Image: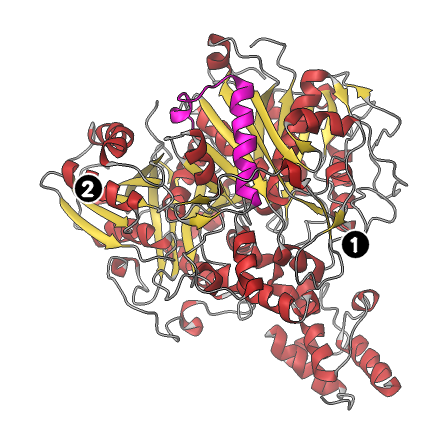
């Protein structure tokens, strides 16, 4: 399906701070090298069963900015600034050019660590510290004057932020959008998920027979999304085209479980492919949401089988969270970065070794990186509450 | 850049202390009395009792807004209906209580049913099974401007064809102790049933039309810098449509708030300005209340509702009530 | 802390109150999720209250089998007798 009337959007810059280190190079190399391992979280009062996260090395966490509008900033907004600056520099957008670039962020817990430190220390009454201050911190740091939006769609926030950014480009509201996510370590977040038994005390092992829940990760991931014409006019090299970012919701009565048949997830994936003009047999890799929870991985496996039912050789699936954990509000953006790297470099990292659950009937290649043999990468980004997003990244053919 | 998408408002719901109907939305109130939300009247039915208070306010506001649309909304296919809800403090007290529990005794003593409501998205998400929404549910959380941003995001999504009708709104509860919020000044929920400006008539009632522009002025701007950012938006806004009669500004005494206030005074001319003070710890409902009130309570004049956060966010809603010249 | 086993009727009435349903709808055999449409977190929430009320701790594996008033009653009777 071609739509000559519609503005196309490409990713021209990437930035990351993750458990694999500072920078998108460390991220890409780390994925090909097999990813990271989770560690116990070093916070006071970790009174819970599952205490591990895939943690960003302290040396990769910048010390600045220390405050914004009088409130102290925790590691998450600081990592966001570093990743956002890297993405802009990578895209070749210099200081002073970012004023017209809106910032759109998936962010849920945001600056929560500052509140948690105050509670743990029994400190006095501070200035009001909203959680979702991160997009403003990024806008301040990069000099944006075009708006700073926070989208709190929990673990699907990345897919929703990309959708909002794509709508802005397509509507001609902006030529360039800085889109990202950033989350830190939060005791209360971990405790909540521990309470409802969806976190694994050991490690994140999507699609494994013995999977026991997800394991969270901190970090920040940003991308510069730009109209293809704008990128071409300034000679910017695109990693990938964002052909679609489609949303759906289950409207299911359970507050945390997905709808068992995955009907709305299937619809999001199919509509995303259709909107991007990509047939299922043109998908060379799927980055599933794949959290490692019992229910999500089984439901998503069934949904993927339906979407690719008519494709003779189904695409390889890359379960990213087995390598870097679940970035919650950042997870969708980490998947976007991995998908963009796969689409542009043509190489799919190997999955972590897994004793695969027969209930999760997907192809999980584990013997070294694979070549991407078809142009498109399909990515899912979902959340509790039956919130689904599915987006399509395609090889953009070198210069736009 | 192109003008922002406009939307048409076909239903209004308001649930806040002293403002249990949209036409009371402009009335200011003090501290909320503890029993202001009478669930038997505002949210009768089963399965709501254990929800966090904010979620009940939101459900009540949505129910009230949808009463305006009759069967039209209910009859739309589920995959054409969506929700975009803004909020800053809706889950704040819950997170605060939870963390204190974890510190004191451990995660095993947390209430399982309330865990999902640590995420703002659950508040919007709870509307989905309630009203059969399958297009999407989205949570906006920027300080102070999230309510107006919900309208902006709804308009953009409607224009992009993501849905036919969107419940756009805001929900707030008391800020938590660890946020240093102090007394609550911005509690309750507002919901607007929105359709695309160009969509066929969606029922008999049309409250009016709305579009929202966003900007960022930084944490400590001077008036000249604010002018550089906001003048183009202002000119764009004033370039067409009926005359702009009044301005409602929801501001605090932060450097950003004061700089925008000074800019506004210079630009407003003889238009009536209503300045609504935004105490520290307030959320994102107050600006949306102004929109609801302007649409529901008139006078039928075009109004701008402006909100500024201490962190530098600015949102500007262009509100055109039905009887003021636009069909 | 009470360790006396509740009667089936007491337990049914407790669930009826918590679920905001008439006692005769809750009954003894109705499956909380399949018949009454109660989600697993809401069920867990009620079982947590029973933990506190009767001074017991449920293992993770035990939650999944407690899907009706009869099942909960039998479990409590067994556990409290053993205590």
Is disc 1 surrounded by few (<14), some (14 to 19) or many (20+) residues within 10 Å? many
> Is A202 left, or right, of B234 in this rendering?
right
Measured Cα–Cα span from mark 2 to mark 1:
54 Å
Q: Is residue A134 above or below residue A4?
A: below
- Which residue is nearer to you in this view: B219 or B84? B219
Q: Chain of mark 1?
A: A
Residue at 42% across / 26% down in the picture?
Answer: A101
Q: Quadrant of residue C21?
A: bottom right
The residue beneath circle 1 is A201
In the rendering, at what x and y percent does residue B109 appear? Answer: 67, 70
Q: Could you tell me if residue A271 is visible in this image?
A: no
Residue at 38% across / 52% down in the picture?
Answer: B284
> Is A32 left, or right, of A59 in this rendering?
right
Q: Chain of mark 2?
A: B
Residue at 90% across / 41% down in the picture?
Answer: A355
Discs 2, 1 touching: Cβ within 8 Å: no
Q: Quadrant of residue A321?
A: top right
Are both tags, 2 and 1, on one chain? no
- Which residue is nearer to you in this view: A368 or C48? A368
Is disc 2 surrounded by few (<14), some (14 to 19) or many (20+) residues within 10 Å? some
Q: Which mark is residue B262?
A: 2
Q: Could you tell me if residue A203 is visible in this image?
A: yes
Q: Is residue A93 above or below residue C31?
A: above
In the rendering, at what x and y percent does residue A379 appear? Answer: 67, 31
Secondary element under disc 2, as helix, strand or loop, is: helix
Residue at 69% across / 27% down in the picture?
Answer: A26
Magenta residues, dominant SS class: helix
Region in magenta: A75-101
In the rendering, at what x and y percent does residue C63 appear? Answer: 78, 68
């Amino acid at each position: 399906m071609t739509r000559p009337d519609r503005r196309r959007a490409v990713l021209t810059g990437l930035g990351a701070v993750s458990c694999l280190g500072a920078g998108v190079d460390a991220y890409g190399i780390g994925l090909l090298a097999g990813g990271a391992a989770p560690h116990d979280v070093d916070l006071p009062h970790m009174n819970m069963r599952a205490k591990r996260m895939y943690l960003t090395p302290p040396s990769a966490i910048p010390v600045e900015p220390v405050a914004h509008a009088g409130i102290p900033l925790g590691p998450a907004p600081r990592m966001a600034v570093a990743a956002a600056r890297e993405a802009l520099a990578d895209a070749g957008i210099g200081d002073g050019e970012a004023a017209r670039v809106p910032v759109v962020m998936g962010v849920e817990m945001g600056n929560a660590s500052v509140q948690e430190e105050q509670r743990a220390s029994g400190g006095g009454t501070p200035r009001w510290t909203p959680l979702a201050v991160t997009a403003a911190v990024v806008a301040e740091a990069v000099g944006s004057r075009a708006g700073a939006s926070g989208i709190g769609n929990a673990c699907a926030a990345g897919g929703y932020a990309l959708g909002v950014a794509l709508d802005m480009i397509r509507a001609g509201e902006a030529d360039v959008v800085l889109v990202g996510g950033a989350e830190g370590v939060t005791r209360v977040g971990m405790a909540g998920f521990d309470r409802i038994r969806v976190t694994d005390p050991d490690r994140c092992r999507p699609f494994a027979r013995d999977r026991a829940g997800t394991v969270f990760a901190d970090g920040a991931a940003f991308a510069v999304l730009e109209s293809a014409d704008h990128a071409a006019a300034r000679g910017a090299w695109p990693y990938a085209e964002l052909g679609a970012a489609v949303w759906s919701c289950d409207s299911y009565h359970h507050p945390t479980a997905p709808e068992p048949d995955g009907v709305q997830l299937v619809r999001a994936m199919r509509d995303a492919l259709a909107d991007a003009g990509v047939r299922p047999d043109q998908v060379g890799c799927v980055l599933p949401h794949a959290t490692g929870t019992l229910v999500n991985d089984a439901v998503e496996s069934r949904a993927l089988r339906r979407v690719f039912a008519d494709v003779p050789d189904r695409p390889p699936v890359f379960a990213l969270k087995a390598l870097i954990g679940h970035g919650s509000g950042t997870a969708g953006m980490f998947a976007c970065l991995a998908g963009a790297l796969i689409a542009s470099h043509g190489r799919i990292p190997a999955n972590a070794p897994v004793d695969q659950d027969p209930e999760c009937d997907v192809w999980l290649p584990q013997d070294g990186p694979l070549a991407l043999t078809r142009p498109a990468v399909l990515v899912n980004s979902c959340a509790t509450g039956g919130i689904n997003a599915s987006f399509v990244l395609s090889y953009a053919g070198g210069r736009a | 850049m192109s003008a922002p998408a406009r939307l048409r408002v076909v239903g209004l719901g308001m649930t806040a202390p002293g403002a249990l109907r949209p036409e009371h939305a402009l009335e200011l109130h003090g501290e909320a009395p503890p029993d202001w939300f009478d669930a038997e009247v505002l949210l009768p039915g089963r399965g709501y009792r254990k929800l966090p208070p904010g979620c009940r306010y939101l459900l009540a506001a949505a129910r009230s807004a949808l009463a305006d649309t009759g069967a039209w909304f209910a009859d739309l296919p589920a995959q054409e209906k969506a929700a975009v809800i803004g909020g800053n403090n809706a889950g704040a007290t819950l997170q605060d209580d939870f963390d204190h529990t974890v510190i004191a005794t451990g995660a095993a003593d947390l209430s399982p049913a309330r865990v999902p409501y640590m995420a703002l998205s659950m508040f919007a998400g709870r509307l989905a099974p309630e009203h059969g929404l399958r297009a999407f549910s989205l949570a906006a959380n920027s300080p102070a401007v999230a309510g107006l941003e919900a309208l902006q995001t709804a308009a953009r999504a409607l224009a992009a064809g993501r849905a036919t009708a969107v419940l756009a709104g805001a929900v707030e509860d008391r800020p938590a102790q660890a946020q240093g919020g102090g007394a609550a000044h911005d509690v309750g929920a507002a919901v607007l049933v929105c359709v695309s400006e160009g969509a066929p008539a969606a029922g008999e009632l049309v409250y009016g039309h709305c579009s929202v522009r966003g900007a960022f002025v930084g944490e400590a701007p001077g008036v000249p810098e604010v002018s550089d950012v906001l003048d183009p938006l202002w000119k764009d806004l004033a370039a067409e449509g009926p005359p702009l009669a009044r301005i409602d500004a929801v501001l605090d005494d932060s450097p950003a708030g004061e700089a925008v206030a000074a800019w506004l005074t210079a630009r407003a001319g003889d238009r009536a300005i209503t300045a609504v003070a935004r105490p520290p710890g307030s959320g994102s409902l107050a600006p949306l209340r102004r929109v609801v009130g302007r649409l529901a309570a008139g006078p039928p004049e075009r109004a701008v509702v402006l909100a500024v956060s201490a962190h530098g966010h600015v949102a500007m809603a262009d509100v055109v009530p039905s009887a003021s010249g636009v069909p | 802390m009470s360790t006396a086993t509740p009667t089936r009727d007491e337990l049914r009435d407790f669930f009826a109150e918590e679920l905001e349903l008439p006692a005769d709808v809750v009954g003894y055999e109705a499956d909380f999720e399949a018949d009454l449409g109660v989600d697993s977190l809401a069920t867990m929430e009620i079982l947590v209250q029973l933990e506190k009320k009767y001074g017991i701790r449920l293992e993770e594996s035990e939650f999944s089998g407690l899907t009706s008033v009869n099942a909960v009653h039998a479990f409590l009777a067994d556990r409290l007798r053993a205590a």
